[in-house]
Image (cartoon, helix red, strand yellow):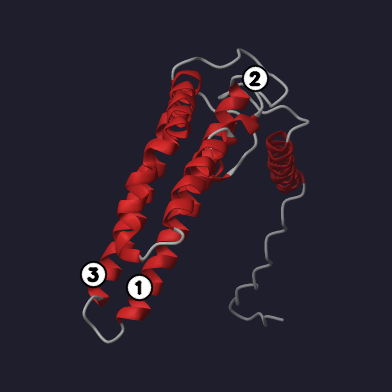
């Protein structure tokens, strides 16, 4: 599987090694994006364009979160597929995350920015059940996706990782087109080589050499 398909595609299956490799790359990429955003904010601190730097920092943070989330979901969905399970299980953390957000934003919604941190800390115990559910879900992801082998052989999500893709899947159709193009190019090359052997190009005529007492026409 190509790197772009590994990090961006939601189709097909990946094994445990590909999952951990993709997770490592996604983590490194997210840290690089965050460091770029932090460096931009630090460069603009104390300058006249601090507001513009803060806006650029916010945009980069949002972009890094979106890209990292996409990478993570793409890896988890394909790994669930390899386990023979629906990729929608990757959205399980959304509910506890929404619960945590509702508790925290509800606590800091009517207070001043300086008191927001204290209000969030005071309301944190109310979000404890959501935290516990989130930890349990991610622990299940760690066991199910990172430690247990996938289904042997093809399943409804495609061929096993490393095997030729099934013909009725997007990857299989792409592979069939590539093979057809390669076969067509090979046949053209063979036909051209055979034609050159059977019908060689005639050698260009050479002008007759002049001899003593004879005029060359």
Q: Is residue 45 above or below residue 182?
A: below
Q: Residue at x 64, y 22 (%)?
A: 85
Nearest the viewer among 19 and 166 is 19
Q: Residues within 10 Å of mark 3 (few under 14, many from 20)?
A: some
Q: Are marks 3 and 1 in contact (CB under 8 Å)?
A: no
Is tag 2's residue or tag 3's residue first in the polypeptide sequence?
Answer: 3
Q: Nearer the viewer, mark 2 or mark 3?
A: 3
Q: Are marks 2 and 3 in contact (CB under 8 Å)?
A: no
**Residue 7 visible in this rendered orientation of the protein:** no
Residue drawn at 35 percent across, 65 percent down:
113
Residue 153 picture location, percent across and down: 64, 14
Determine whether, in the image, residue 205 is placed left or right of residue 144.
right
18 horizontally vs 197: left or right:
left
Residue at the left extreme of this rendering: 46
Distance, label 2 to label 1, CA atoms, is 45 Å
Q: Residue furthest top?
A: 152
Pick the residue in front: 169 or 73: 73
Report the disc number at residue 42: 3
Find residue 103 and report its horizontal and vertical position in percent: 48, 45
Q: Which residue is mark 1?
A: 54
Q: In the picture shown, does residue 211 fall above or below 117?
A: below
Whether 137 is drawn above or below 72: the answer is above
Residue linked to disc 2: 84
Marks 2 and 3, how far apart in space? 47 Å
Which image quarter: residue 183? top right
User: Disc 3 or 1, which lies upstream in sequence?
Assistant: 3
Q: Position of residue 68 (x, y in %)?
A: 46, 48
| Contact check, label 2 and label 1, Cβ < 8 Å | no
Q: Quadrant of the N terminus?
A: top right
Neighbourhood count class around disc 1 (C-alpha, 10 Å): few under 14, some 14–19, many 20 upward = some
Observer-side mark, 2 or 1, equals 1
């Amino acid at each position: 599987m190509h790197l772009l398909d590994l990090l961006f595609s939601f189709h097909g299956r990946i094994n445990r090694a590909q999952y951990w490799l993709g997770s490592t790359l996604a983590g490194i990429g997210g840290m690089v994006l965050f460091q770029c955003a932090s460096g931009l904010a630090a460069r603009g601190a104390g300058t006249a364009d601090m507001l513009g730097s803060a806006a650029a920092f916010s945009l980069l943070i949002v972009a890094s979160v979106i890209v990292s989330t996409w990478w993570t979901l793409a890896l988890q969905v394909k790994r669930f597929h390899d386990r023979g399970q629906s990729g929608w299980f990757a959205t399980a953390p959304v509910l506890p995350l929404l619960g945590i957000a509702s508790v925290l934003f509800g606590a800091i919604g009517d207070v001043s920015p300086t008191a927001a941190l204290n209000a969030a800390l005071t309301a944190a115990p109310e979000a404890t059940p959501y935290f516990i559910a989130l930890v349990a879900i991610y622990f299940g992801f760690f066991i199910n996706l990172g430690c247990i082998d996938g289904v042997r052989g093809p399943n409804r999500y495609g061929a096993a990782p490393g095997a030729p893709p099934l013909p009725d899947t997007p990857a299989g159709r792409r592979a069939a087109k590539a093979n057809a193009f390669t076969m067509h190019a090979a046949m053209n090359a063979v036909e051209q080589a055979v034609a050159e052997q059977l019908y060689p190009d005639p050698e260009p005529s050479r002008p007759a050499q002049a001899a003593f007492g004879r005029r060359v026409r």
